[in-house]
Image: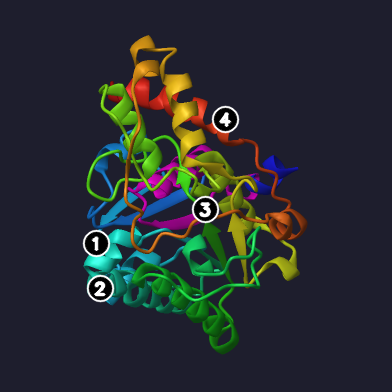
Amino acid sequence: MQKEQFSKLSSKKILVTGGAGFIGSNLCEKLIELDASVVCLDNFATGKRENLSAIIEHSNFTLIEGDIRNLETCHRAAKGVDYIFHEAALGSVPRSLKDPITTNEVNVSGFLNMLVAARDAKVKRFVYAASSSTYGDSENLPKVEDVIGKPLSPYAITKYVNELYADIFKSAYDLDTIGLRYFNVFGRKQDPDGAYAAVIPKFVIQLMNHESPLINGDGTYSRDFTYIDNVIQMNLLALTSENEEAVNEVYNTAVGDRTNLLELTTLLKEYLSKYDPEIAKIEIKHGPNRAGDIPHSLASVEKAKEKLGYNPQFDIRAGLKEAVNWYWKNLK
């Protein structure tokens, strides 16, 4: 059923902002596979050209190097497109605490620029990357979309503001939007380098290099780690759903299960040691808890299942096996 639904994207023109990033580049590849015409907008602040190497020469692919903080660039990228996937953002809670101004300029002003460009180009639907950080200090588990807490970082504030702006653009300008609150996405092409690298690729590379990963805290903090292919499925469902009740909503984009950091490192060592037995002997180190981090995160995905037909195909084990295999083949 989903294959038939997604096939409707054939010959459609779709803009992916942040298309050279981790999630964006995977989206671009999938859209090319579906025979869509893809426009990628990226300033390469965090995205990488090598993420586009498989499609950069494809006749259906166009790359625009530019910044969403420039309204004229946004208008140029959105011209003539049917749909927009807005993935461009400055992620990372620690980055936002260090530099809240740039985080706000990209994630709020840049987001508003893209909404204006989408409105003016009369796009059919605007699907954007929201964030589980919006739940803030809410202790409710699992997280359900209509119960949020107080934001715990500048990054979380910016992603919540995105949801508010999207809602206003529906009521004021009749722009259809869907927000996807991502929960700790991981998988192929996720950058293991840099100060703000996500925990899974960072730990994978450290273990591959026979270094001891550092867990912030005692390792009992848990997350709803979500493999990239589940996220691609959610994005495509959000873009193609014909259920009128599904549009102009936000959805948790997760697997609906949680894994703590001790369990995570145990699994990573198990899967990586099949390639290199010495990895099984590496000890894990512990440091202080990180500012702005919430102790536990677990999503309810019932709303996405009910309204969008979401059916995650990869649990944490299946996803980690795929990710470890990719990193070993591509980065060892």
The percent coordinates of residue 102 (x first, y second) are 23, 70
Above or below, 59 relative to 267: below
Amino acid type shown at disc 4: Arg
Mark toward the start of the polypeptide (4 vs 2): 2
- Can residue 90 be seen from the camera position used here? no
User: Magenta segment, which residues?
Assistant: 7-34
Amino acid type shown at disc 3: Phe
The percent coordinates of residue 121 (x first, y second) are 45, 74
Q: How many marks?
A: 4
Mark toward the start of the polypeptide (3 vs 1): 1
The percent coordinates of residue 50 (x first, y second) are 27, 37
* Mark 3 neighbour class, 10 Å CA radius: few under 14, some 14 to 19, many 20 or more: many
The magenta stretch spans residue 183 = no
Residue labelled with disc 1: 66
Residue labelled with disc 4: 317
Amino acid type shown at disc 1: Gly
Instruction: Name the disc covering residue 70, or none.
Output: 2
Residue labelled with disc 3: 183
Badge 1 marks a residue whose secondary structure is loop
